[in-house]
Image (cartoon, grey):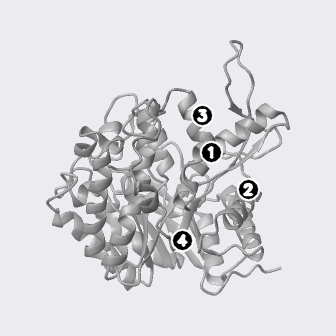
Amino acid sequence: MTLSFPKDFVWGAATASYQIEGAWDEDGKSESIWDRFAHTPGKILNGDTGDVACDHYHRWRDDVQLMRDLGLNAYRFSIAWPRILPAGRGAVNQRGLDFYNRLVDELLEQNITPYVTLYHWDLPQVLEDAGGWAVRDTAQAFAEYADVVSRALGDRVKNWFTHNEPFCAAFLGYQMGVHAPGVTDWHKAIVASHHLLLSHGWAMPIIRQNSADAQAGIVLNVGFNMPATNRREDLDAVRFGDGFVHRWFLDPLFGRHYPADMVDAYCANGFLPKGMSFVQADDLAAISAPMDFLGVNYYRRSIMSQPTASDGTPSHEEIRLPDSEYTEMGWEVYPDGLYQLLCRLHFEYRPAKIFITENGASYADAPDAQGVIDDTRRIDYLRGHLTAAHRAIQAGVPLAGYFYWSLMDNFEWAYGYSERFGIVWIDYATQQRILKASARWYADVIRRNGL
């Protein structure tokens, strides 16, 4: 049986600036928080950095050729803020802007539609030194940055995402400390999450003003959580996890304010000693500016339990099932979770359109003696998740496109180069690119517009 997708369905792949570009200090680019974090001993596995990464800054033309050969009709990439505004705001670095101008022109020449993400976590370090996302001024700086980029590219780029995964930028960066800037402060993380959302809201009308007929939205990481049992404690773990990662962002974006149960929990734990006093009068109206689409990054299901610690303190953990398949990141392969969450987003929040902006799996399959990379597990992962996406369309979900994560193996944040998500193999020593079997399989899906 053939599963055909809508005739205008968008087939793409995604990357992020710090993960692939390299050239970390070239052509006027300033230091980002990820440059600083990766250069700090002990922060990244094996001491890896994004200094060179996939050297995309110098090899972009070859990489666009790869995209064309695969038949991609869209490419989602992010802009490096420190390349454009080395001081975070103010003077524009034309050499940095020229790089993205050339990239956009080449994509369009090859009939590949650019989907631009303005922020994929590489904040200029100078802004972090002034307080980062924990201060309101950074949201204003982002609006100015969005203005510069959308003025420069908006005549050709018509699809914009403001932020990628603000949850990760706020809570992995400012509460858990496992991502840049490496802060561990609950209050700062919660305030940072608000300023990230506020900067999104402020940027939306700027993008529309500068880019005629543009469509714009935001990208959220949304998983699928289930309780390990029907015990109240496990159900509470799922509710809190959903509020922490999902509803805290979805609710204000869709005009519902911040979820009251999470505000109460944060206040009760002492994380908000002055309550939500950092939220000013017009902030929530700005955050809930209508979006043309919502980007969704889905990778896995989480099965959650909340055991009681020996001292009586509540805690929670994720349960690993012995009969389930897991990727090399330790993430469960669960395509039905994608179907479930797409339906949830559609029926609960009613976004005008949804894009799957990231979905993929880490498998380390390497070239054999003939240079062939037979990554069958990744093909199975893709087939399962695209089948789930098709089911969601059949159920009425306005799913408009799919971007595989990632086009190429790259710097996987705190994991360095130890995880490989790409459909294109990167030999980091030589920068050779090799198409994996999954790339050829995906190219066939695109050609057929279906499975």
Give me the C-alpha separation between circle 4 and circle 1: 22 Å
Tell me the mark number nearer the camera, choosing from 4 and 3: 3
**Mark 1 Cα-neighbour bin, 10 Å: few <14, some 14–19, many ≥20:** many
- Residue underneath mark 2: 337
Amino acid carrying label 1: it is Gly
- Circle 4: element type: strand
Q: Residue furthest bottom?
A: 7
- Residue underneath mark 1: 243
Q: Is residue 372 left or right of residue 321?
A: left
Going from N to C along the chain, the mark reached first, 2 or 1, is 1
Residue at image location 53% in from the left, 75% down from the top? 70
Contact (Cβ within 8 Å) of mark 2 with mark 1: no
Residue 222 vs residue 389, the one in the foreground: 222
- Residue underneath mark 3: 265
Residue at image location 31% in from the left, 36% down from the top? 39
- Residue underneath mark 4: 293
